[in-house]
Image (spheres, helix red, strand yellow):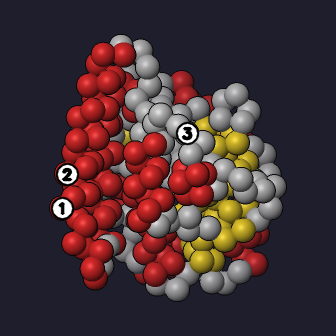
Amino acid sequence: MLWAAVVVNYNAGEALLACVDSLLADTSAGEAPEIVVVDNASDDGSADALAAAHPEVTLVRAPTNLGFSRANNLGMAATYAPVVAAVNPDVEVDPGTARAMVDRLAASADLAAVGPRVRNPDGSQYPSARVVPSGVDAVGHAILGLIWPANPFTRRYRRLDADWSRSRDVGWLSGSAVWLRRSAFDEVGGWDEGFFMYLEDVDLCARLTGAGWRVAYEPGGAVLHLQGVSTDRHPYRMIIEHHRSAIRFAAKHWHGPRRLLLGPAAAFLAVRAVLQLGGRRVGGRTERPRTIR
């Protein structure tokens, strides 16, 4: 097949069927994609519902929750298409998106990954295509992002002032919906399984660009991202995983004199995680955990 899609499911409920239905309905690239769903030991019946509704979809049942990266690698290994999309189970793909993504990759031999426009449930634009932040912007965003979302550091990092109707090269793309050239993906070794959740998309794009490939945003395709369907069930763990991933990313990608900042950065992130956990406990359990993404 021309393209395939890998969906990693963990208790996504009815959203999983809506996601798969939208993927199968998008035949704009000539045919429906090959779909592989890797279920991370869900206990909500979503995997069984998928198997009953779509027996033609390959369902890989993991014995435990493998995390995003490891499960995605498992799904990628079960496909053969030259283009493979990683799509979250709480994402619904608009008709025509497959053609826009496949054509964009075909038009540029040095393009490794392309991401569509991502809409929030209220119809607003989600900043899914960003730059890898400078040290100053990373610190400013981490300190101020939760209390002042429109601060200048966050605006630069999340590209909040960008024209989202135009194609452009970017530093990284949200892993909620990204179309990958298999040859480039294989060249850099796939998703880093050391990231259980969060920043695995930043890491993958950084390794792709480091290997000489390009990463681009293409608004000719679009998806709806519900967000938090799986992660909201374990908010405290997600806060911890997000900060752990940030420390891992820094340890992996900071080189030279910048490595002297790893100790202070780890200490800062540990304190920040404790404060965020405490703030959530005081604020109540119904509020979605906010991260520094």
Measured in 3D between alpha carbons, the distance from the residue under mark 3 to the one under mark 2, in whole angstroms, is 23 Å
In the image, 242 versus 89, the foreground residue is 242
Circle 3 SS class: loop
Q: Give the tally of numbered discs.
A: 3
Picture residue at 38% right of the left edge, 40% below the top: 39
SS for dot 1: helix
Task: Mark 1: give few (<14), some (14-19) or many (20+) Cα within 10 Å.
Answer: few
Callout 2: few (<14), some (14-19), or many (20+) C-alpha neighbours within 10 Å? Answer: few
State if disc 2 and disc 3 touch (CB < 8 Å). no
CA–CA distance between discs 2 and 1? 6 Å
> x%, y% of residue 30?
78, 60
Secondary structure type for disc 2: helix
Q: Is residue 57 above or below residue 277?
A: below
Give, as a three-letter code, the residue at label 1: Gly
Residue at the disc numbered 3? 149
The mark nearer the N terminus, 1 or 3, is 3
- Which residue is labeled 1 in the image? 263
- Determine contact: label 2, label 1, CB under 8 Å: yes
Q: For the point 68% across and 62% down, which residue is it?
A: 217
Q: Residue at x 40, y 45 (%)?
A: 143
Q: Which circle marks residue 267 in the picture? A: 2
Residue 252 found in image quarter: bottom left
> Is 134 displayed left or right of 93 in the figure?
left
Percent coordinates x, y for residue 253 in the rendering: 33, 72
Picture quadrant where residue 265 is located = bottom left
Quadrant in which the N terminus is drawn: bottom right
* Amino acid on which disc 2 is placed: Ala
Q: Which mark is residue 14?
A: none
Q: Can residue 173 be seen in this view?
A: no
Q: Residue at x 56, y 64 (%)?
A: 131
Pick whichever, 169 or 10, lies toward us: 169
Q: Check disc 3 and give the amino acid type.
A: Pro
